[in-house]
Each structure stands twice: as structure tokens, then as C-alpha cells.
Image (tube, grey):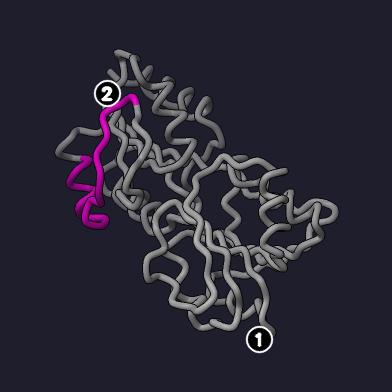
């Protein structure tokens, strides 16, 4: 059974590990290529885009793909829409492997915003010390608020993505530890955290640390995902779906 896994997430890696060595499956993991040093994975991997809906549909036909698992990042809205349209055009079954969002708990001081531009506005005019963890591609809007002092953590180098006078950049990749996150925020005298509601456990410690310190968190909401797509929340559930699909294959 030929499977395309649209990846770049912990969930995609977990599914890849479960598919590895299964002779009844012939999986390919597709990565966007935004991370220069991705972790090695145990199944064949392709890097780069497809060329929109038309290119993805062509790939599915050419490769005789029998199932697609969209395990992209919760904020990869364009790729998810392209996958839904391409699978609808080609008749290839599509499953979305989507981690649940974080849920507000007692003590959380969340300020929900719809996008990064709104997050910039929510910071206000008064200079603040900001812990910014929205990913390199989402940094440019914050250049409109250069009065703040930014502690920016990304996987890739920040480069010139945020040209402000007061910036300290950290390159790191989760999973993180709550006590270490708390020490970092205290040492850097962080006053507000700005992040995306990515869900999952790897980066949740910053949310827990902010709660413990009584810090506000400006939380960017997830973009809308395509409706009508079957969803699961774990690699185990995705594997079960694939096994059931394989059982239907002549």
C-alpha cells in the first residue's frame, strides 16, 4: 500500500517509526524543507513542495498513492487545504493527524489573538520584555514594534527576520523542561510570552512556566483546517486507519 505522509511534526515522526519495516506498507514522508537539519527518519523522505494543488494531485497519480496522512503542523493551513483539494480530485483517501490544542487551565493569563499581526498589537505601546516563540517565518510583523526587548527562540537562525535594536536569539528545539523554562524566563526578566497554540507536549512547558510565574501569554489561534476530513489525534490511531484501509485494498 503506497502511503504519503505529509510531515514535519512529532506525530509524523511517530507514525513513520510505526510504518518502518511493515512490508505491507510503502510509505514516503514529505517534508517542507524549512528546517535545514531535520532529524533522520526510518522511511524514505522527500524534501520540498509539490507545486500547489495541481502538483500534489499529479504526484498522487504518478506515484499511485493509495492513502495520504496529513500530519503537518497545526499552523500549516495552506498545505492542509492543498491536500484536501488534491485528494478530492484524485479520489485518494485522506486522514488528518492533528494534535489537540492546549486548553486554558486555572491560573493561565491567556490573551487570544487570531494572527501574529494581532499579537503585535496586543503587546501595546509600552516597552516590554517579550519571550517570542512563533517560529522564524512569523517574526517580521514584530518589527513594527521595535520598542520591546525580544528574547526569540527558533530552530533556524533568526538572521534578518526581525530587525529590532534589542533582540537576543536562542536556537533550540523541543522537548523542553518546565523548570528550565521558568529559570530562563526569570533570568531574562520576561514580562510576556508570545506563542502559537501548537498543542502537544514538547513545547507546553513554557505555558506551564508562564502560569507558575503569573505571566500573561499572548496566544495565536490556529488557522481553520479543511472541513469534512476524517481526523485522529495520535500515531496509533493513524496506523489503525491505515491498517483498515489496507484491509480493503484488493
Q: Is residue 62 magenta?
A: no
Is residue 140 or residue 146 the one in the foreground? Answer: 146
In this rendering, is residue 188 above or below 46? below
| Residue stretch rendered in magenta on the structure | 42-60
Position of the C terminus, as image quadrant, is: top left
In the rendered image, the residue lying farthest to the right is 106
**Residue 155 location in percent, x, y?**
44, 51
Provide the secondary structure element on which disc 1 rests. loop
Q: Position of residue 199 (x, y in %)?
A: 60, 47
Left or right: where does residue 225 sit relative to residue 180?
left
> Along the line of sight, which residue is nearer the eye, 149 or 98?
149
194 and 230: which is toward the camera: 194
Task: Specify the farthest residue to the left.
Answer: 62
Q: Residue under circle 2?
A: 26
| Mark 1 Cα-neighbour bin, 10 Å: few <14, some 14–19, many ≥20 | few
- Please tell me the numbered disc located at residue 125: 1
Instruction: Please tell me in which quadrant of the rendered image residue 162 appears.
Output: bottom left
Q: Is 33 placed above or below 142 here?
A: above
Q: Nearer the viewer, residue 100 or 141?
A: 141
Q: At x 24% / y 39%, what residue is drawn?
A: 46
| CA neighbours of label 2 inside 10 A, class few (<14), some (14 to 19), many (20+) | some
Q: Residue at x 50, y 45 (%)?
A: 173
Q: For the point 56% across and 42% down, which residue is it?
A: 99
Q: Are marks 1 and 2 in contact (CB under 8 Å)?
A: no
Query: Which numbered mark, 1 or 2, is in the foreground of this view?
Result: 1
Residue 112: numbered disc: none
Residue placed furthest toward the bottom: 125
Q: Residue at x 34, y 52 (%)?
A: 34
Q: Is residue 46 above or below residue 143?
A: above
Amino acid at each position: 500500500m503506497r502511503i504519503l505522509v505529509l510531515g514535519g511534526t512529532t506525530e509524523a515522526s511517530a507514525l513513520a517509526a510505526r510504518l518502518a519495516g511493515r512490508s505491507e506498507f510503502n510509505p514516503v514522508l514529505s517534508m517542507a524543507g524549512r528546517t535545514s537539519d531535520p532529524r533522520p527518519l526510518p522511511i524514505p523522505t522527500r524534501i520540498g513542495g509539490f507545486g500547489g494543488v495541481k502538483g500534489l494531485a499529479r504526484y498522487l497519480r504518478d506515484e499511485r498513492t493509495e492513502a495520504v496522512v496529513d500530519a503537518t503542523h497545526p499552523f500549516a493551513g495552506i498545505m492542509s487545504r492543498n491536500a484536501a483539494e488534491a485528494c478530492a480530485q484524485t479520489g485518494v483517501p485522506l486522514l488528518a493527524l492533528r494534535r489537540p490544542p492546549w486548553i486554558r487551565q486555572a491560573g493561565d493569563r491567556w490573551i487570544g489573538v487570531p494572527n501574529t499581526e494581532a499579537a503585535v498589537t496586543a503587546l501595546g505601546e509600552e516597552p516590554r520584555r517579550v519571550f517570542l516563540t512563533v517560529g522564524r517565518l512569523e517574526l517580521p510583523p514584530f518589527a513594527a514594534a521595535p520598542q520591546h526587548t525580544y528574547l526569540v527562540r527558533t530552530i533556524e537562525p533568526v538572521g534578518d527576520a526581525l530587525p529590532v535594536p534589542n533582540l537576543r536569539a536562542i536556537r533550540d528545539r523541543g522537548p523542553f523542561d518546565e523548570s528550565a523554562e521558568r529559570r530562563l524566563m526569570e533570568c531574562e526578566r520576561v514580562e510576556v510570552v508570545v506563542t502559537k497554540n501548537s498543542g502537544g507536549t514538547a513545547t507546553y512547558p513554557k505555558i506551564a512556566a508562564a502560569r507558575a510565574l503569573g505571566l500573561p501569554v499572548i496566544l495565536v489561534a490556529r488557522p481553520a483546517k479543511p472541513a469534512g476530513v476524517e481526523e485522529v489525534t495520535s500515531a496509533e490511531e493513524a496506523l489503525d486507519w491505515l491498517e483498515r484501509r489496507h484491509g480493503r485494498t484488493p
